[in-house]
């Protein structure tokens, strides 16, 4: 089966001249649809850089990244927004919600951006799918950390992207809400045959992932498949 | 995207208030200063604008209509012989002293006109009749200057240059650019008030035959009568207007005031919109990371400034209209006709758009990778 994401000999350097710093050094990795892949590694090892390049946010220095067979290294700056919009959902450690908008509006604005028909309705449905039907009209300031992260997951799901990229999604959460967020994220890989990539230090994630890749000094350290306890769909909400 | 612009604007309450205050302040400054300028244009030469004469004869080299000096009245008869001239009339404008009931003096300007031709007479009469000026020692003044001239009602008697003057009527809204109000009277009465010889006048007003070439008549007059200057209506109008509005600096000052308003507005609005963009940089970065194009980010910023512009305009123009209304019955004329009000809306939009340019530049340089930082 063709991998959804295929990374080979990827190099990413920051800066130039004397300040040049190689953050990713010859990374090769295939990611399959339906898989929950966890990226682990020490701080500064290049995890965020890797998912930024995968998600078309940063351009690579050399190597190849194919998404669904399409090469994105060397893609022009003007083509990137559409690539990000059509293929990816992003989840951030700091949630990055719009504080002036309600939970539903936060999701709906992304539905509009992705040309989802009936964006308000779609947003309500997505919030329901992360168990926040009753928080539609709440503002981020009135939500707990775990609820905020669930809103941001609902937002990332707008337009049903094939790939979800989450950078330390549980770092700011307590253990109960962190576990819930991880349950939801791993459940999402099975739906619609998605790939879910989670950057984390959180050992709880081991219960929910299919594969763990460690990054050390910009290189792939280890890469192992895991057995895990899959949550049943009923647990998700 | 519209909802983000709208709600972000109201989310920053304090900033919205600062932005609106800036716009309102700028708008009121622009509207009032420009309105005063328009008022000056109106007031400076209203005595010419409301005079039906086609040509004016005066002493040579007069600076403006309020600065004439005596010429021989007999020149009228020579003027009548120039082909195309159908009517002539005397007309005097001259600064005189008006004695208040309490004994103090005010300066005013006699406008002595020929009652038979009506050229140079008062307009907008609200009390009395022009015909009443046929009586001896009679004058008509404007009701905006009642207090200044110590007058309350028709029939009151005062003194002009030591001669009796009886009020027989009031006009409304005949303002004077100088602080000296106009006092209308017959040319004959005026001779008593103005230190001038019997056979002299300040102006000779002419009416010409319908369709006649006024410039040709003007040349004819200059060739026939020595020691005079001849103006068409437009010429004396613009000489007077230019003298008072631009020669005195009043016009330039008000126009500069209006420009200053524009500048203040742009700076304040630019500052607040820029600060708002900086505050929301992470949100814009998030939008960009999630696939929004630069164009879509600009839309939010431009929409924000447009919304601020519309709200600021509604508030600002209301304040300006209130000020204009409150000065309606004073000697200061501030005009805010609707095309100007409309123009100010355009200016407000321009102000807010140019203010947001700075922010748009900043938004272009957003690094979407910033979204991953804490
Ligand atoms: N914009 C940048 N410019 C220069 N160096 C950077 C930049 N972003 C990250 N780095 C460096 O690249 C390395 C990898 O960073 P990052 O991918 O954020 O690591 P991680 O997410 O694993 O903590 C770090 O040493 C970091 O200092
Ligand atoms: Mg990181």
Image (tube, rainbow, N blue to C red):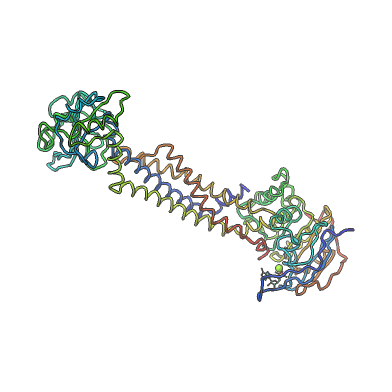
Which image quadrant is residue A45 in? bottom right
Answer with the quadrant where ligand 1 appears in the image: bottom right
The N terminus of chain A is located in which quarter?
bottom right
Residue A116 against residue B166 in the figure, above or below: below
Q: Residue furthest bottom?
A: A18
Please provide percent x and percent y for residue B73. Answer: 15, 31
Residue B232 against residue B29 in the figure, above or below: above
Q: Residue at x 21, y 28 (%)?
A: B169
Q: Residue furthest right?
A: A1
Residue B223 against residue A96 in the figure, above or below: above
The C terminus of chain A is located in which quarter?
bottom right
Which image quadrant is residue B106 in? top left
Near-viewer residue (B49 or B374): B49
Q: Specify whether residue B104 is in view.
A: yes
Please provide percent x and percent y for residue A140. Answer: 64, 55
- Would residue B72 be found to the left or right of residue B314 on screen? left
Which image quadrant is residue A149 in? bottom right
Please provide percent x and percent y for residue A176. Answer: 74, 63
Q: Residue at x 67, y 72 (%)?
A: A16
- Would residue B229 be found to the left or right of residue B164 on screen? right
Near-viewer residue (B19 or B363): B363
Total tally of numbered discs in the picture: 0
Q: Residue furthest front?
A: B223
- Would residue B80 be found to the left or right of residue A236 on screen? left
Please provide percent x and percent y for residue B176. Answer: 25, 39
Q: Specify whether residue B129 is in view.
A: no
């Amino acid at each position: 089966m063709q991998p959804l994401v295929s990374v080979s000999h990827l190099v990413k350097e920051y800066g130039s001249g004397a300040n040049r710093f190689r953050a990713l050094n010859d990374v090769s990795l295939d990611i399959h649809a339906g898989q929950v892949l966890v990226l682990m590694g020490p701080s500064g090892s290049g995890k965020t850089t890797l998912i930024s390049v995968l998600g078309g946010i940063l351009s690579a220095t050399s190597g190849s990244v194919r998404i669904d067979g399409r090469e994105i290294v060397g893609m022009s700056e003007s083509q990137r927004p559409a690539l990000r919009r059509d293929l990816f959902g992003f989840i951030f450690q700091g949630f990055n919600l719009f504080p002036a908008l309600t939970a539903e509006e936060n999701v709906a604005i992304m539905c509009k951006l992705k040309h989802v028909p009936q964006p308000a309705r779609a947003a309500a449905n997505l919030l329901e799918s992360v168990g926040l039907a009753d928080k539609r009209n709440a503002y981020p300031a009135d939500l707990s950390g775990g609820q905020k992260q669930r809103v941001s997951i609902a937002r990332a799901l707008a337009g049903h992207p094939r790939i979800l990229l989450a950078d330390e999604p549980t770092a700011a959460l307590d253990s109960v809400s962190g576990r819930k967020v991880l349950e939801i994220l791993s459940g999402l890989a099975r739906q619609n045959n998605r790939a879910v990539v989670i950057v984390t230090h959180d050992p709880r994630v081991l219960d929910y992932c299919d594969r763990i890749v460690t990054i050390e000094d910009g290189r792939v350290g280890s890469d192992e498949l895991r057995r895990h306890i899959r949550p049943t769909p009923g647990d998700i909400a | 995207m519209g909802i983000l612009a709208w709600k972000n604007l109201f989310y920053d309450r304090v900033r919205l208030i600062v932005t609106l205050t800036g716009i309102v302040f700028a708008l009121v400054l622009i509207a009032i200063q420009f309105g005063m300028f328009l008022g000056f244009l109106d007031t400076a030469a209203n005595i010419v604008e409301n005079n039906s004469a086609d040509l004016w004869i005066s002493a040579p080299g007069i600076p403006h209509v309020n600065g004439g000096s005596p010429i021989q009245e007999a020149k009228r008869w020579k003027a009548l012989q120039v082909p195309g001239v159908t009517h002539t009339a005397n007309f005097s404008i001259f600064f005189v002293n008006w004695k208040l009931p309490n004994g103090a003096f005010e300066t005013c300007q006699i406008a002595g006109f020929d009652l038979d031709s009506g050229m140079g007479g008062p307009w907008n009469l609200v009390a009395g009749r022009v015909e009443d000026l046929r009586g001896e020692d009679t004058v008509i003044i404007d009701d905006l200057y009642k207090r200044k001239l110590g007058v309350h009602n028709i029939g009151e008697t005062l003194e002009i240059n030591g001669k009796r003057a009886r009020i027989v009527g009031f006009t409304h809204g005949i303002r004077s650019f100088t602080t000296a109000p106009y006092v209308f009277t017959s040319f004959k009465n005026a001779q008593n008030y103005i230190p001038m010889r019997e056979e002299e006048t300040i102006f000779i007003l002419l009416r010409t035959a319908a369709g006649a070439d006024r410039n040709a008549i003007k040349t004819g007059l200059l060739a026939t009568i020595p020691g005079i200057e001849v103006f068409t209506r437009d010429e004396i109008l613009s000489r007077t207007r230019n003298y008072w509005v631009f020669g005195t600096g009043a016009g330039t000052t008000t126009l500069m005031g209006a420009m200053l308003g524009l500048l203040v507005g742009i700076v304040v609005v630019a500052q607040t919109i820029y600060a708002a963009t900086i505050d929301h940089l992470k949100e814009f970065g998030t939008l960009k990371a999630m696939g929004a194009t630069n164009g879509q980010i600009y839309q939010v910023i431009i929409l924000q400034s447009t919304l601020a512009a519309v709200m600021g305009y509604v508030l600002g123009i209301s304040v300006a209209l209130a000020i204009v209304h409150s000065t309606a019955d004073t000697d200061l004329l501030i005009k805010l006709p609707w095309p100007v009000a409309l123009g100010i809306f355009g200016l407000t939009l321009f102000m807010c758009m140019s203010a947001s340019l700075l922010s748009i530049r900043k938004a272009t340089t957003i690094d979407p990778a910033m979204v991953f930082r804490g």
